Amino acid sequence: FVCFLRLHKYFTYRLALYQILSSLCLGIVELSFLTLLNYDGHIYHYQIGCKTTAFLLEYFVWIKLLFTLCLVFHLFSLAVCLKNFQKLEIGYVLFSILFPVLYSWIPFIHNSFDLAGAWCWIRDWKNDCANEKYLEGIIEQFVLWYGPLFISLTLS
């Protein structure tokens, strides 16, 4: 549709297209959770898949959020400041794709990627027991996701 109407020639539509592509990648990662539902007792293979999926989820969610922030910044600069930052397109893309690499690997340090309730993410309890909270995992959830998410949504 975008190519048919030749909207990809306009910078704002390309930013929206990046947003859509990041949503597509995130959707593919979330579909990979379905492969983890067929758990057959081989805990080693399940843990590798769970940790991989959790890392990719963390990475692509942040790509989507950063493309959203770039789009909001660009639309704000057009509407309020009357400036077009079209020459920053490569910077927007590189920032949105490379910046999440800097911190998406941090839960690997504490071995925090594992089951977190019904899905794979940063675990928040010890030894599959909901009564024992895993403090490092809870801190990582807030530092790596909820805190920055709240700040970015407030800025938007």
Image: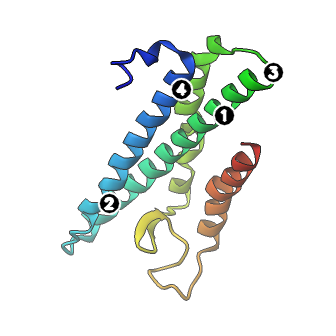
Indicate which disc, 4 or 1, sits on the residue closer to the N terminus.
4
Tell me the residue that label 3 is attached to: 81
- Labelled pair 2, 3 in contact (Cβ < 8 Å): no
Indicate which disc, 1 or 2, sits on the residue closer to the N terminus.
2
Query: Helix, strand, or loop for circle 3?
Result: loop
Res 15 label? 4
Considering depth in this image, is 43 or 4 the residue closer to the camera? 4
Query: Few, some or many C-alpha atoms within 10 Å of disc 2 (few <14, some 14-19, many ≥20)?
Result: some
Quadrant including the C terminus? top right
Query: Few, some or many C-alpha atoms within 10 Å of disc 4 (few <14, some 14-19, many ≥20)?
Result: many
Indicate which disc, 2 or 3, sits on the residue closer to the N terminus.
2
3 lies left or right of 127? left
Q: CA distance from mark 1 to mark 2?
A: 30 Å
Say above or below: 15 vs 155. Answer: above
Indicate which disc, 2 or 4, sits on the residue closer to the N terminus.
4
Q: Nearer the viewer, mark 1 or mark 2?
A: 1
Tell me the residue that label 1 is attached to: 72
Tell me the residue that label 2 is attached to: 33
Query: Helix, strand, or loop for circle 4?
Result: helix
Q: Amino acid at mark 2?
A: Phe
Q: CA distance from mark 4 to mark 3?
A: 18 Å
Residue lying furthest front: 5
Residue lying furthest bottom: 131
Image point (61%, 31%), residue name: 71
